Amino acid sequence: MLTCPKCQAGLEKRSSDNGIFWHCTSCDGRAATLPLLRRSVQPEFLRALWVSANQGTSAAHCRCPFCNRPMAEVPATGVSGEFFLDVCTSCHLVWFDLQEFQALPQKPPPTVEAELPADAREKLALLKVECIRERAESGWEGHGAAPAEWWQWLPAVLGMPVETASAATRIRPWATWGLAILIAAISILAFFDLENAVERFGLIPAQYGRYGG
Ligand SMILES: [Zn+2]
Ligand SMILES: [Zn+2]
């Protein structure tokens, strides 16, 4: 069993929102690892603490509950002034007295999304998944299924714009069809008198402005 470095009582394993820590029920001190502290404490504070701990200038007063090596006593500045923390650089462990733990400079509050209640976050996540699924199904991001027929590849191969999952046509495009029939009819008629048609309407580079271009 792990023992308290201050009063030698047994340490209890506790879990918090940020992870596991060890608590002394006798003196209310607690041991927390750096990964746990990074979740709630200002990074600048921890960086300065770690640099001082590695310099190891202060005399050690107590031993690490994990590895029993002497812990470095490191001066730290909290919200209520300066105090000393015990740090084990081998185990990345920091020992706090109760007041010391409460004096740690906290990180700014998390983002709005993290503050939402669990069921709201779950619904938000499900909505995002649904949105991604719908996009994938409609081929929105270019990952749609391949065309069913071989000839449906042709427009894309010829470099024409291709629409996938388009809505059904609501009205018949009579104007477009009429124009196509008119062009086809005039072109076919022109073949019956090709020489005259080419002479009258063919492009002559020297007369590029003919009939208004
Ligand atoms: Zn204790
Ligand atoms: Zn240690």
Image (cartoon, grey):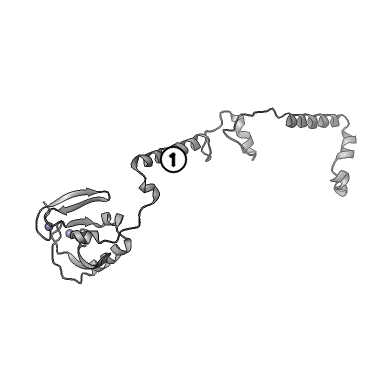
* Residue 92, visible in the rendered structure: no
* Residue 43, visible in the rendered structure: yes
Outermost residue to the left: 8
**Residue 119 in picture, x, y percent from top left:** 35, 39
Residue named by callout 1:
128
Q: Nearer the viewer, residue 78 or 140?
A: 78
Q: Is residue 152 left or right of residue 3?
A: right
**Residue 211 in picture, x, y percent from top left:** 87, 43
Q: Residues within 10 Å of mark 1 (few under 14, many from 20)?
A: few
The residue lying at 87 percent from left, 49 percent from top is: 206
Please tell me whether mark 1 sits on a helix, a strand or a loop.
helix
Outermost residue to the front: 80
Q: Nearer the viewer, residue 22 or 56?
A: 22
Whether ligand 2 has any atom under 8 Å from the Cβ at mark 1 is answered as no
The residue lying at 27 percent from left, 51 percent from top is: 18
Outermost residue to the bottom: 57
The residue lying at 30 percent from left, 55 percent from top is: 40
Q: Is residue 189 left or right of residue 70?
A: right
Q: Quadrant of residue 169?
A: top right
**Residue 190 in picture, x, y percent from top left:** 85, 32
Query: Is 119 located above or below residue 79 in the figure?
Result: above
**Residue 165 in picture, x, y percent from top left:** 57, 33
Query: Is 96 located above or below residue 13 in the figure?
Result: below
